[in-house]
Image (tube, rainbow, N blue to C red):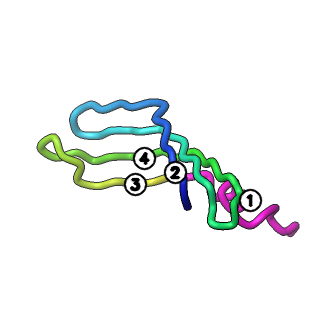
Amino acid sequence: MTGRDVTLHHLHSDGERGIVEATETATLANGNHCANDYCFGLDLRNGLIHRVREYAGTARGHRMVFGDLPQQ
């Protein structure tokens, strides 16, 4: 991927947990444009990130990289 860009939409933290919503855009190796939404769940300890859980639109990402999903 080249030309990666991350846009943060929402950030929230209560001191122990945090949520980040973002969109990443990039140009794939084959020249196709890719954009996908992400949500990160953060566990914080002593003001530092201890653990990250990442959630993404996997079907949307698959379509952008490989084309439409096969019919089932």
Q: Secondary structure at mark 4?
A: strand
The correct choice, above or below, for 8 with respect to 39 in the image is above
Q: Which residue is mark 3?
A: 53
Quadrant in the picture for the C terminus = bottom right
Extreme-right residue of the structure: 71
Judge the density around disc 4: few (<14), some (14-19), many (≥20) Cα neighbours within 10 Å: some
The image's mark for residue 63 is 1
Q: Secondary structure at mark 3?
A: strand
Q: Amino acid under label 4?
A: Phe
**Pointer 3 with pointer 2, Cβ within 8 A:** no
Judge the density around disc 1: few (<14), some (14-19), many (≥20) Cα neighbours within 10 Å: few
Which callout, 3 or 2, points to the residue nearer the camera?
A: 2
Identify the residue at horizontal 63%, vertical 66% (top origin).
29
Q: Which residue is mark 2?
A: 4
The image's mark for residue 40 is 4
Mark toward the start of the polypeptide (1 vs 4): 4
